[in-house]
Amino acid sequence: MSAINRDILMAYLDEQLDPAARADVETHLATNPETAGELDTMRRQADTMRALYPAIGNAPVPARLDPHRLALLVQRRRWQAMAQAAMIVALLGIGITAGWLLRPTDAPALYNRLIADAVSAHTVYVAENRHAVEVASDDTEHLSTWLSDRLSTRLAMPDLTGQGFTFLGGRLLPAPALPGGRAAQLMYETASGERLTLYVTPATGIDGPEFEMVRLGAETALYWSDEAISCTIVSDQPPEALEALASVIFSQLNPVEPHENYREL
Amino acid sequence: MVDFLDEMEACVPALRRYARALTHNLDHADDLVQDCLERAISRRSLFRPRGPLRPWLFTILTNLHRNARRAERRRGERVDLNTIADLGTPAPQPGHMALVELARHIETLPLDQKEALLLVTLEGLAYQEAADILQIPVGTLMSRLGRARTTLRQLTGATNEPRLRTVK
């Protein structure tokens, strides 16, 4: 007869024992009224508990506990969540696209600022006689090297003698429209003293038209840009004469023929 | 899917009974069961272990109840022991007071002992199955069960079963 400990007694009560072990316990109980009493107490306790929490049996189950209904709800909620997520994505997409389309239009304004800088530099320096240029035309080679160096791009000094313009020289200028920008100003003069300037900057990488003709007061500005440089010609010549000059200038600044269609503003 | 839901439906009465015993509140109990079923439905494909559905549902319900208890304790709410008078017990009868008293005592048991006691006594689960549901070893389950029963015997024995007080 093995000893009956609490665990075995409990297992007997809870019907967890195999028949042989059950028989052992029953034999033991027959001769140990104290243990039998303990078992009785535990059994009564268990019966009371079952009476306290009676099996729910076939009592009607509330609709909210019906798994079929819940499954539908869960599915619907999942769809709603997905629809919501899709909606958020769509709204974000619309927002981002609209934001992009309506983005501050700084970039197009930049080339206008370049033109304005060119015109103001023009009006300042064409009025000068002794200090119209920083480096005079008699040192063309040095001027070309120096400006090319400062602008980090190869810069030729166009020859406009065929058009009646003498090269006076050039200077280095800040280009306020571009952060940390520099510009080269080249000045030409006719026999009658009419002056023309070129305002050349390295390629700005900004959006803008390739060609633009603007009248600003007495001056006409013709802006032109390619992948290497941007150049604004400023003079008080009539637009047609300026266009003719421009093609000569551009072909010397850049071997590629300039576009024929200027956009009139 | 339909099989799964039917199988689940068959477990609902047992889950409600267990939830009632855990919460002592019919509405909370049904809330708990509903949460449990919803969770089981929505995670069925991801987390359902192989094997029978019933133990898995009991595990979910146990964990949900523990979480709710923890949240409740954080909020500082106490379970009102008087609510047990509203339990779905039979009309007052000679043993009614004993029932109410036992319910009170069960309520004072530590939660882990209470869970073990309810699963084994009410649901009649095998020790191994109950241990799996509670995610503990069988030995731990048995010691919890033993402590729960000893405590209850001491508490109820004092008033209801004087002739057995000397036992053990």
Image (tube, helix red, strand yellow):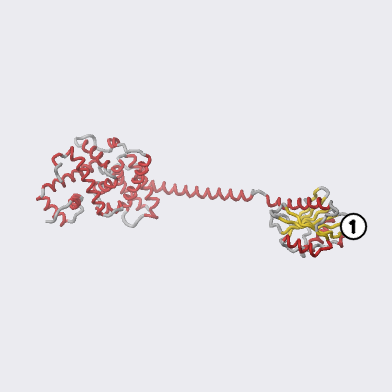
Q: Tell me if residue B39 comes above or below residue A143 in the rendering.
A: above
Instruction: Look at the image and tell me whether residue A224 can be seen.
Output: no
Q: Position of residue A66 (x, y in %)?
A: 35, 45
Tell which of A44 and A234 is nearer to you: A234
At mark 1, the secondary structure is: loop
Q: Position of residue B19 (x, y in %)?
A: 31, 44
Instruction: Look at the image and tell me whether residue A129 can be seen.
Output: yes
In the image, is A87 to the left or to the right of A166? left
Number of numbered discs:
1
Question: Could you tell me which chain the residue with mark 1 belongs to?
Answer: A
Q: Tell me if residue A101 comes above or below residue A247 in the rendering.
A: above
Tell which of A175 and A225 is nearer to you: A175
In the image, is A93 to the left or to the right of B69? right
Q: Position of residue B3 (x, y in %)?
A: 35, 53
Q: For the residue marked with disc 1, what is the amino acid?
A: Ala
Residue, disc 1: A191
Circle 1 Cα neighbour tier, 10 Å, few/some/many (<14 / 14–19 / ≥20): few
In percent of the image, x 18 and y 39: which residue is there?
B158
Residue projecting furthest to the left: A31
Q: Position of residue A247 (x, y in %)?
A: 81, 60
Tell which of A21 and A188 is nearer to you: A188
* Quadrant of the rendered image containing residue B49: bottom left
Tell which of A175 and A70 is nearer to you: A175
